[in-house]
């Protein structure tokens, strides 16, 4: 079971993620969007969306530091385990709380605003359920995952982080991940599910970036050559007075 979960499933999820993004880009470019509902309601969105997205960036940065930087390196630069754990607990806890607050506001807005709720599909509901579950399990793992059921101390940087880095060299350390507490294991499994559904939900916008803007053709919106301007070549007024000549002829 450990081999299937921690040795095979991560690469299957990666194939689904990459293949799904390619498929979505080729066959549904106009659907590559969040399908914004800002026109229906904007007050709660202006508050909840920034809170959620800025907190998400902080959480992702924390994950990258915890998963990619080995424990030996932090020990070498003088950060002991107690200091690191305190920073991860308080910093990650605050970011997690802000993330939950932002998500609750977005879900409440979607449920309480009739027009927004009518625009919510079953796809959106499943996405929000998986996303909320991942965030909730992440908070549980942060607060309670440092102790095994037998009371022994658990350091995720010696289990989850080791397994995560081993995936990049195609030698998954399933034993390391198998030694993690159930809180982290459950969080990782649901997290992989979240990545697998990204190409098929509004979360696909997380992979949007205007890279084509860097390679766009040069566009001349207007010339700076004064000789090409109408005011430089046409002297006097650009119109004739309407009816003036006829009035003069009548008087004569």
Image: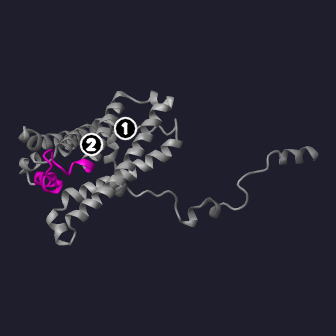
- Per the rendering, the mark at residue 156 is none
Q: Residue at x 44, y 46 (%)?
A: 49
Q: From which residue to which does the magenta span run?
A: 142-168
- x, y (%) of residue 76? 16, 71
Viewer can see residue 226:
yes
- 127 or 1, which lies in front? 1
Note whether 124 is above or below 160 in the view shown: above
- 207 or 157, which lies in front? 157
Is residue 155 toward the left or the right of residue 104 in the image?
Answer: left
Res 120 quadrant in image: top left
- x, y (%) of residue 237? 73, 57
According to the picture, the residue beneath numbered tag 2 turns out to be 137
According to the picture, the residue beneath numbered tag 1 turns out to be 30
- x, y (%) of residue 24? 28, 38
Secondary element type, mark 2: helix
Residue 89 belongs to magenta span: no
Secondary element type, mark 1: helix
Res 69 quadrant in image: bottom left
- 54 or 143, which lies in front? 143
Note whether 184 is above or below 119 in the view shown: below
Residue 146 belongs to magenta span: yes
């Amino acid at each position: 079971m450990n081999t299937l979960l921690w040795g095979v499933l991560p690469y299957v999820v990666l194939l689904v993620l990459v293949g799904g993004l390619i498929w979505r880009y080729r066959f549904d470019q106009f659907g590559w969007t969040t399908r914004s509902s800002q026109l229906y309601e904007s007050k709660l969105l202006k508050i909840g969306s920034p809170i959620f997205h800025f907190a998400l960036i902080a959480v992702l940065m924390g994950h990258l530091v915890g998963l990619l930087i080995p424990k030996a390196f932090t020990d070498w630069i003088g950060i002991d385990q107690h200091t690191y754990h305190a920073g991860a607990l308080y910093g990650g806890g605050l970011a997690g709380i802000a993330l939950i607050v932002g998500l609750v506001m977005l879900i409440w807005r979607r449920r309480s605003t009739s027009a927004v709720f009518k625009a919510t599909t079953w796809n959106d509901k499943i996405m929000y359920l998986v996303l909320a579950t991942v965030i909730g399990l992440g908070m549980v793992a942060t607060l309670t995952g440092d102790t095994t059921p037998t009371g022994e101390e658990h350091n995720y940087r010696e289990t989850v982080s080791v397994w995560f880095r081993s995936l990049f060299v195609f030698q998954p350390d399933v034993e390391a991940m198998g030694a993690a507490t159930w809180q982290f294991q459950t969080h990782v499994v649901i997290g992989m599910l979240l990545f697998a559904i990204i190409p098929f939900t509004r979360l696909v916008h997380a992979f949007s970036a205007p890279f084509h803007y860097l390679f766009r053709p040069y566009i001349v919106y207007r010339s700076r050559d004064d000789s090409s301007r109408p005011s430089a070549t046409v002297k006097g007024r650009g119109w004739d007075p309407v009816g003036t000549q006829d009035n003069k002829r009548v008087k004569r």
